[in-house]
Amino acid sequence: MDTRCVLVRVERHDIGLLCSFMAGYEGMAIVRTVDPKQGLVALLVAPAFYMTVLDIIRALSQEMPLRLLRTEAGDMHEWY
């Protein structure tokens, strides 16, 4: 399956909040915690939802400490 990865950094205590928030957008992204100590979270996104997820991340960054680190298409095995 073709996926894109969006890597973000949040405060450690906000990882659960981000996971819960993204769960509200059912099927839009699979959320994986890459490194809980550093607050690194990967969002695995289908290409059809990629721009929407980036818009959500940009909006969330206005409401909580969240930083978009990298976006990448293709095989995501290196992230988790």
Image (tube, helix red, strand yellow):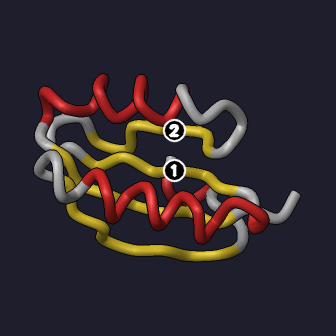
Q: Position of residue 31 (x, y in %)?
A: 51, 38
Q: Secondary structure at mark 1?
A: strand
SS for dot 2: strand
- Name the residue rendered at 67%, 31% in the picture: 26
Residue 37 point in image, percent of width and height: 15, 37
CA–CA distance between discs 2 and 1? 5 Å
Are dots 2 and 1 in contact, CB under 8 Å?
A: yes
Which residue position is annotated with label 2? 31
Q: Residue at x 51, y 46 (%)?
A: 80
Identify the image quadrant of residue 52.
Answer: bottom right
Residue kind at label 2, given as amino acid type: Val
Direction from residue 19 to residue 4 in the image, left or right? right
* Amino acid type at image mark 1: Leu
Residue 43 disc label? 1
Out of 73 and 20, give the one closest to the viewer. 20
State the image coordinates of residue 10 (x, y, percent, origin top left): 19, 47
Residue at image coords 39%, 74%:
70
